[in-house]
Image: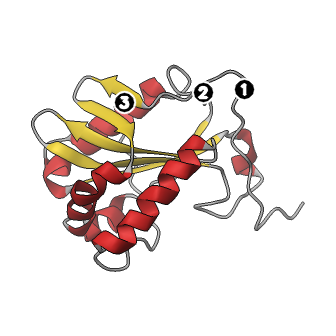
Amino acid sequence: MDIAGLTKKLAIAPGVVVPRTLDHERVHAHAITRDDLEADVAGINTSLELIRRTRGGSWPTRPVTLEGNYVDLVWHEAEFRDDKSYTYVLTNPHHGYIGCVYLYPLGVRRQLTVEMLRHDVDVSWWVTPSAYEAGLYTATFEALQCWLGDELPFAAPFYSNVEIPR
């Protein structure tokens, strides 16, 4: 079966509301909005190499601008509202803004494979260099493992980051 180029839509049961905020020990998350613009631009631009090294993929190819990132944040808001994908800002009480988490349909971020069909969501994340040094990259992975299937309606995540904590 050739499924290259296809996506597996996120299946949200009727009546299920995906939470806009999540909390776990040292990591907190809230649905990204245009109000996060300045912190998001600063976070991305200080993390270019770390994002590509840990999350993988080609984004970001260069520093982002306020204007360009504003369009992305509005798109993320609409996707969240329409249950098409979910993007969260990560924060920590001592570090403030520390990065983002993305919950995408399978086949959007990476080419869909037959093996991936047993999963229900593509999960990726990144944190800033200072958050990484403070162990918050691993803390985010631990938080995701608690949130998924418990607070978030996905029980079979596919973690698509290149660097997965062990």
Return the residue found at the far bottom.
Answer: 62
Q: Residue at x 63, y 41 (%)?
A: 83
Q: Does residue 159 show up?
A: no
Q: Looking at the rendered structure, which numbered label has been put on residue 143?
A: 3
Residue 86's place in the image compared with 18, above or below, is below
Q: Report the Cα–Cα distance between label 1 and label 3.
A: 23 Å
Give the mark nearer the N terminus: 1 vs 2: 1
Numbered disc 2: secondary structure: loop
Numbered disc 1: secondary structure: loop
Numbered disc 3: secondary structure: helix
Q: Residue at x 54, y 44 (%)?
A: 80
Q: Which residue in the structure is indicated by mark 2?
A: 153
Q: Report the Cα–Cα distance between label 1 and label 2.
A: 8 Å
Residue type for callout 2 = Pro
Q: Are marks 1 and 2 in contact (CB under 8 Å)?
A: yes
Mark 3, residues whose alpha carbon is within 10 Å: few (<14), some, or many (≥20)?
many
Q: Looking at the rendered structure, which numbered label has been put on residue 13?
A: 1
69 lies left or right of 2: left
Q: Are marks 1 and 3 in contact (CB under 8 Å)?
A: no
Mark 1, residues whose alpha carbon is within 10 Å: few (<14), some, or many (≥20)?
few
Give the mark nearer the N terminus: 1 vs 3: 1
For the N terminus, give its image quadrant. Answer: bottom right
Residue type for callout 1 = Ala
